[in-house]
Image (cartoon, grey):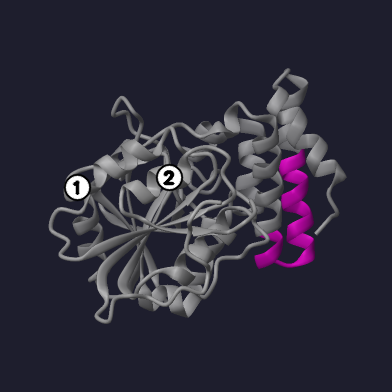
Amino acid sequence: MLDVEPLDVEPLEVEPLDVVALVVTYNSARHLPGLFDSFERGFVGVDRWAVVVADNASSDESVAIARARGARVVATGRNGGYAAGLNAAAGAAPAARARLVLNPDVELSEHCVGRLARALERRGVGIAVPRLVGPDGTLRWSLRRDPTVLRAFGEAFLGGERAGRVAALGELVVDEDRYRRSGPVDWATGAAMLVSSACWEAVGAWDERFFLYSEETDFAIRARRAGFDVWYEAMASVGHTEGESHTSERLAAILASSRVRCFAKHHGRVRAFAFRLAVVVNEAIRAAAGRRTSRAALRQLLRADRP
């Protein structure tokens, strides 16, 4: 049996750290060396930091790698999803002024965390997110606008990138100039985000009803309702491997149903029904064009209970 920390471990540190990184793993062994290698440059300028890994019952060497790299490991005992893993990691983490949420398939650039931490010093900012780039350095469209019924229909008929050129018609921010400028945003891809402890405590636990996808949308919505801004820091950069929702039928189905669940949580039944219809139309159009991931998403949406 692997020697891992139980969930009720008491923090060892008395004085709070500057930052504690929270990483959720599930068969992530191929990504973890790159992530841990990037910490030395990513945490430059941060005086005290630590890493807590919540492992969702991996069958590979994820736990062994994390422990060998000095991380504190929490075994959840099940694959309960990303939000559940984050809650487990946060529950076992030492006190810190900010918590850095990281996917296992990211790599930090030099001074990244320090720049995000300085962004949190701005009045009202509770969440700071970096610029995301691919392995070859190309910009990822990581910034998002709040989901609306109109935007969901815009994306259904125009596609995400074309709809995103008009703010009213798409969630995706596709203006390259916007990615060169730091400033407040509605929300952003949750592959890397620094959350102040004050914000985390005010918002509360991540919603574990989201197995994967939309948990960061929900958290950002709740943070803003609690009075905290989400800040995009253009000078902080994080490398991110392309997500598998574009190729995995299972993940595409989870993504579509999570979008509907998140919208239904924050809006009335009438708007939730209209949003769900827009997502169904979106997937139906692309399924008819032969996209197998959309066929899987459509099957999931038609099976799911209506909000």
Give residue 149's mark: none
182 to the left or right of 217: left
73 to the left or right of 276: left
Q: What whole-number distance in Å separates the C-alpha atoms at marks 1 and 2? A: 20 Å
Q: Please, which residue is most extreme toward the top here? A: 290
Which SS does the magenta portion mostly show?
helix
Residue kind at label 1, given as amino acid type: Glu
Residue 128, how many percent across, how many down? 33, 60
Q: Please, which residue is most extreme toward the front here? A: 1
**What is the crowding at mark 2: few (fewer than 14 residues within 10 Å), some, or many (at least 20)?**
some
Residue 77, how many percent across, how many down? 62, 56
Q: Which of 88 and 103 is in front in this view?
A: 88
Region of the chain picked out in magenta, as a range: 263-280
Q: Which of 141 and 62 is in front in this view?
A: 62
**What is the crowding at mark 1: few (fewer than 14 residues within 10 Å), some, or many (at least 20)?**
few
Which label's residue is closer to the chain start, 1 or 2? Answer: 1
Residue at 73% over, 19% down: 289
Q: Please, which residue is most extreme toward the left here? A: 45
Q: Nearer the viewer, residue 296 or 99?
A: 99
Q: Is residue 42 magenta?
A: no
208 to the left or right of 271: left
Residue 31's quadrant in the figure?
Answer: top left
Q: Is mark 1 on a helix, strand or loop?
A: helix
Residue kind at label 2, given as amino acid type: Ala
Q: How many labels, in total?
A: 2
Residue 133, how many percent across, how many down? 33, 35
Q: Which of 151 and 135 is in front in this view?
A: 135
Q: In this figure, which residue is indicated by the disc labeled 2?
A: 64
Q: In this figure, which residue is indicated by the disc labeled 1?
A: 40
Residue at 32% over, 28% down: 138
Q: Is residue 278 magenta?
A: yes
Residue 185, how many percent across, how many down? 39, 57
